[in-house]
Image (cartoon, rainbow, N blue to C red):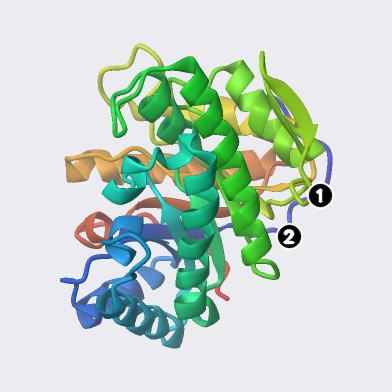
């Protein structure tokens, strides 16, 4: 591993955590017991994944019951001292939004995305520590509009460029609406679609404040420059040509990606928003240990991470043994 000598990071302690996908059927008391148990191991943060489709099951009509549950859970986490970061958008979009073209349609995006962000912020904003507008923006656009493997199942370079541009604009809209709150850009830089050109688009957006799509156009977007408080790398994909999880090989690939981000987003704090999912408890325990050691090694080399959100709350809480994570208690 190459050494980093930019700044002294010996005083920085990463905040370790898990992630949880909200469901109306969840028992908040059970969740709290799991969260508090994991805090004893140093897992003090929760990346809370919400569903746009559940918040707005119908066009323009949020579910009052769903919002009530969201507020209740968010307040319960806050009262328990859990540092909660809300993830607003994954790879599943509302069917009515897809019917209007979703992110490939400028008018639909500008009308419905800000309404969703503002609705959730109004309900849970006082209870959460920060926001992650998009969980995997590269995969969302690449899989939906370039290769068509997920909804809206489109394979069209023009639509892909439109969707990419509108996701960038939507990121910027979210930053404006959530101004004053910490915001992390979760970047799935290990996704197969994250080639050098795609990575450079996001780098240019955050470090230069410019939307720059190769072969299309380049222009400055007000408010885009340094709009992310953190760059959170989603490291969920396996290295190229890997058919199964090999923790040492994944770690080497993860370190390479973090090194790229350190150089590309110089001056912006780095985090990890996710690691690969595993089915076997033994594999997950090993992966958590590798992740913890990787974080320590990177810190020793001068690259300290702010947050490290790892496996799901349910999977982690179900393990019989866990490594000890040195986490900063808020």
Based on the displayed image, in which of its 4 quarters is residue 18 positioned?
A: bottom left
Q: Which residue is mark 1?
A: 8
For this rendering, which residue is in front, 279 or 224?
Answer: 224
Image location (x, y in percent) of residue 105? 48, 38
Q: Secondary structure at mark 1?
A: loop
Based on the displayed image, in which of its 4 quarters is residue 261 positioned?
A: top right
For this rendering, which residue is in front, 304 or 269?
Answer: 269
Q: Are discs 2 and 1 less than 8 Å apart at CB? A: yes
Distance from Cα at disc 2 to Cα at disc 1: 8 Å
Outermost residue on the bottom side: it is 79
- Residue shown at the point (41%, 85%) measured from the top left: 75
- Residue shown at the point (34%, 23%) measured from the top left: 154
Position of residue 57 relative to residue 191, above or below, is below
Pointer 2 local density, CA inside 10 Å: few below 14, some 14–19, many at least 20: few
Q: Secondary structure at mark 2?
A: loop
Image location (x, y in percent) of residue 292? 47, 47
Based on the displayed image, in which of its 4 quarters is residue 80 positioned?
A: bottom left
Position of residue 62 relative to residue 311, above or below, is below
Image location (x, y in percent) of residue 274? 42, 45
- Residue shown at the point (45%, 57%) measured from the top left: 87
Query: Which quarter of the figure is the C terminus placed in?
Result: bottom right
Q: How many marks?
A: 2
Image location (x, y in percent) of residue 235? 45, 36
For this rendering, which residue is in front, 238 or 95?
Answer: 95
Q: Which mark is residue 11?
A: 2
Query: Which quarter of the figure is the N terminus placed in?
Result: top right
Task: Judge from the rendering whether residue 311 lies leftward or rightward of residue 270; answer left or right.
Answer: left
- Residue shown at the point (72%, 51%) measured from the top left: 227
């Amino acid at each position: 591993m190459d050494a980093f000598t930019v700044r002294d990071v010996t005083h920085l302690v990463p905040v370790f955590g898990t992630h949880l996908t909200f469901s109306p059927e969840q028992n908040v008391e059970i969740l709290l017991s799991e969260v508090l148990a994991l805090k004893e191991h140093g897992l003090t943060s929760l990346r809370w994944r919400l569903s746009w489709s559940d918040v707005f099951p119908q066009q323009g009509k949020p579910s009052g019951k769903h919002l009530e549950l969201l507020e209740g859970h968010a307040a319960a986490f806050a009262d328990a001292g859990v540092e909660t970061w809300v993830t607003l958008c994954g790879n599943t979009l509302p069917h009515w939004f897809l019917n209007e073209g979703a992110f490939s349609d400028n008018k639909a995006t500008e009308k419905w995305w800000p309404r969703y962000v503002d609705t959730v912020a109004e309900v849970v904003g006082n209870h959460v520590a920060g926001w992650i507008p998009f969980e995997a923006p590269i995969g969302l656009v690449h899989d939906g509009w370039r290769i068509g493997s997920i909804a809206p199942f489109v394979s069209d370079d023009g639509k892909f460029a439109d969707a990419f541009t509108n996701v960038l604009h939507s990121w910027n809209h979210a930053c404006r609406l959530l101004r004053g709150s910490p915001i992390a850009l979760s970047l799935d830089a290990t996704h197969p679609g994250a080639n050098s050109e795609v990575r450079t688009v996001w780098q240019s957006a955050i470090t230069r404040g410019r939307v720059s799509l190769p072969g299309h156009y380049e222009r400055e977007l007000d408010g885009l420059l340094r709009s992310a408080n953190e760059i959170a790398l989603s490291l969920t994909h396996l290295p190229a040509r890997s058919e199964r999880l090999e923790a040492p090989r994944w770690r080497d690939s993860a370190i390479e990606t973090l090194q790229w981000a350190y150089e590309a987003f110089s001056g912006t704090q780095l985090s990890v928003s996710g690691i690969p999912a595993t089915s076997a408890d033994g594999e997950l325990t090993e992966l958590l240990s590798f992740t913890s050691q990787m974080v320590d090694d990177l810190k020793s080399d001068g690259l300290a991470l702010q947050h490290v959100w790892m496996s799901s709350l349910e999977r982690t809480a179900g393990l019989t043994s866990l490594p000890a994570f040195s986490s900063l208690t808020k």
